[in-house]
Amino acid sequence: MLSSSEKKTADMRGAYGDALVELGKTDPRIICVGGDTTDSLKTKKFGDKYPERMFNVGIAEANLVSIAAGLAIAGKISFASTYATFIPGRAVDQIRNAICYPALNVKLVVSHGGLTVGPDGASHQQIEDLSTTRAMPNMRVIVPADAVAVKHLIKIIAETPGPFYARLARPATELVYAESTPAEQFKVGRGNVLVDGSDATIIACGLMVGKALEAAAALKREKGMSVRVVDMFTVKPVDAELVGKCGRETGAIATAEEHNIIGGLGAAVSEAAGETYPVPIRRVGVRDTFGESARDEEVDTLLEQYGLTATEIAKAVLEARSRIRK
C-alpha cells in the first residue's frame, strides 16, 4: 500500500488496455469485442496491435455479448467491453443464457460504473450492475481498487476459465497499491487487508477503497481508533472467511461501494457475516435512488451529495460500533 506522501492517480481503463496488449503477446487466444467505445475503453490499444483479433460490432450490445460467447465456444478467451450501463444493462438475457448457463470463457470488462460517470447522468450511472451479475450462477464479479490492481486482475481472469464481470471506474483514481505490488497479492475470492486494526473494519471495493483508507486515518487521528481496511475486490465469491475473521476480531463492520446498497458489496458482506460471525454492519453507498448529472469537475460534489465520502464512512464505523451489544 502507498504511504500518504506517495499518493497519485492513474487511469484504470488505460491499465486495462495495456494489460490486454501484454496478454496478446503470449496468448493468441486472447480476443476483444467492443461496442463502438473502443477509444474510451482503451481497447483500441489492443486493436491497433492485433487488428485481426479486435471486433468492433457497433452499438449492439446484445450482439456483442453473443459474438463473444461464440468466439469462446471456438476456443478463444473473449474479452467483451463497453460501458457498464450497456453491459449488463442491455444484454442481461444474453449474459445469463449464452455465457453463464454454459459457463463460457468470456470476460465482461466494463467501465463507467457508479456515479462518477458525471455529465451523462442517471441513465448512464450504472448502480445496479453488481447486484445483477452477482445473482447469475457461474459468474464471478471483480471491482478493482486502482490501476495496479487492474493490471494484475486482468491477467488473472484471463488465466482463469469461465465467466467474469469486471467493473472499472471512468475517472483517474487514487493508487492504493504500489506499482511494485506482486501479482501473488491478488487472488479471486480473497480480500486484501491494507491496514490492520482491532476496533472496527471497513470493507470497500473500487474507488471507495481510497476513501476507506482516508476514513480509517481520520478515525485514528481524531478518535484514537484502530480500524482495519479491507480491499474486497472480489465481490463474488466474497471472502466469507475474511469477513468472519474481521467480525470476530473487530466487532463491527462498515462497507463502502459506488453502487446501490441493495445487492452489491454491502449485501455480500452482510450475507457472509450472517453465516459466519454476525456483527453490526453499516453500509455506505447509493441509498436505493438514481443519480443525477454533474460536470466532470463536480463529480466529488456529487459523491458528497450521495454520501460516498470518507466522512460518511467514518460515521458509519462509529454507528456500527455503537450497536455492539455489551
Image (cartoon, helix red, strand yellow):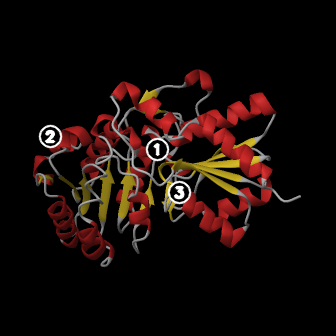
Question: Which of disc 2 and disc 1 is earlier in sequence?
Answer: 2
Which label belongs to residue 48?
2
Image coords of residue 91 (percent x, y): 24, 64
When asked about the image quadrant of residue 297, the answer is top left
Q: How far apart are the two marked residues, 1 and 2, measured between alpha carbons?
A: 24 Å
Residue 85: give x, y in percent of width and height. 29, 52
Q: For mark 1, what is the residue?
A: 149
- Mark before the other along the chain sequence, 3 or 1: 1
Quarter of the view holding residue 29: bottom left
- Tell me if 325 is positioned left or right of 86 in this view: right
Percent from the top left, x then y, of residue 218? 70, 31
Tell me, yes or no, if residue 107 can be seen here.
yes
| Residue bearing the label numbered 3 | 265
Q: Amino acid at mark 3?
A: Leu
Position of 242 with respect to 137 (left or right) is: right
Relative to 39, residue 82 above or below: below
Q: Inspect the image, locate mark 1, and give the three-letter code of the amino acid beneath it.
A: Ala
Q: Amino acid at mark 2?
A: Asp
